[in-house]
Amino acid sequence: MMISTSQRREKTLKMLKQEGSVQVSDLAQQFNVSMVTIRNDLAFFEEQGLATRAYGGAYFNSPDLKERAITDKSRQHNELKDKIARIAASLIDENDAIILDSGTTTFHIAEQLSDRQNLTVLTTGFNVANALADAEGVDLIIAGGQLRRKSLSMGGPVAESALNSFHFNKLFLGVDGFHLTRGITTHREEEARLNRSMCEAAEEIIVVTDSSKFGKLSLHKILETGKINRLVTDSRIPDSYLEGLKAQGVDVLIAE
């Protein structure tokens, strides 16, 4: 039995609030309507300021799910990020070749590496590169591409292509959302593609995030949680996440 437009939109909005984002194809199948109909529904929510459409779906306009400028992010959870960064830096060995994703937590990691020797670091983040600019023992590689001013990072096909030319021991990856069953996510499709290229170029995938990201979903999936090797986070990680990740074979390191 077909439901009315208002009923469908009410259910869709509820899903947006609960899940953080929705996919057009999933909604079309669930409600047995065309994808054009679902796109019109999402356009309606966007006009109301309730959602922002992106390729293949939309995400709910809450402060937790909208992408914030890096200058805003840098003021959040600094003490926790510093503790996480110290643990993450302890995982880096001499002669390692690593990727430091753009972001504020990886910036804190970069600050821990200024005195290291015989280390190769590739990054897409200007803030990370700036933190390592005077580190004489670090061979610093800045991936080219298109500048994203909001995050002060490089992205796009040029950056993705550059990663195909290298092999790295470890990737340190920050995320916008970390969901136990839905995976690690980010706000932009091109950033998700770049992050997946980073994952393919590295032997070991290490996610670094404070506990505020758990249970959060952004629109674009990077990877299933079971495919990461390690997670470095703080002691506020929910017990359900701690147990679930260990069951998936993910090594969880807690910064006290």
Image (tube, grey):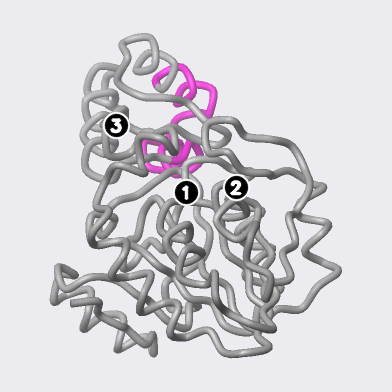
Residue 133 percent across, percent down from the top left: 65, 57
Image coordinates for residue 162, horizontal then vertical, percent: 82, 59
Identify the disc placed on residue 12: 3
- Name the residue at 41% across, 63% down: 183
Q: Earlier in the sequence, mark 3 or mark 1?
A: 3
Q: Contact, CB < 8 Å: mark 1 with mark 2? A: yes
Asked if marks 3 and 2 touch (Cβ < 8 Å), the reply is no
Which element is circle 3 on?
A: helix
Which badge, 1 or 2, is on the more N-terminal residue?
A: 1
Identify the element where label 1 is drawn.
Answer: strand
Q: Tell me the chief SS of the magenta region.
A: helix
Q: CA distance from mark 3 to mark 2?
A: 26 Å
Q: Amino acid at mark 1?
A: Thr
| Lateral position of residue 116 relative to residue 159, left or right | left
Whether pointer 3 and pointer 1 mark residues with C-beta atoms closer than 8 Å, the reply is no
Q: Is residue 113 left or right of residue 208?
A: right
Q: Quadrant of the C terminus?
A: bottom left
Q: Residues within 10 Å of mark 2 (few under 14, many from 20)?
A: many
Q: CA distance from mark 3 to mark 1?
A: 21 Å
Residue 27: image quadrant is: top left
Q: Is residue 25 above or below residue 95?
A: above
* Whole-percent x, y for residue 159 in the image: 76, 51
**As shown in the figure, which amino acid type bears the numbered disc 3?**
Thr
Which amino acid type corresponds to the residue marked 2 in the rendered image? Glu
Which residue bears the numbered disc 1?
186
**In the rendered image, which residue does mark 2 sit on?**
191
Q: Earlier in the sequence, mark 3 or mark 2?
A: 3
Could you tell me which quadrant the N terminus lies in?
top left
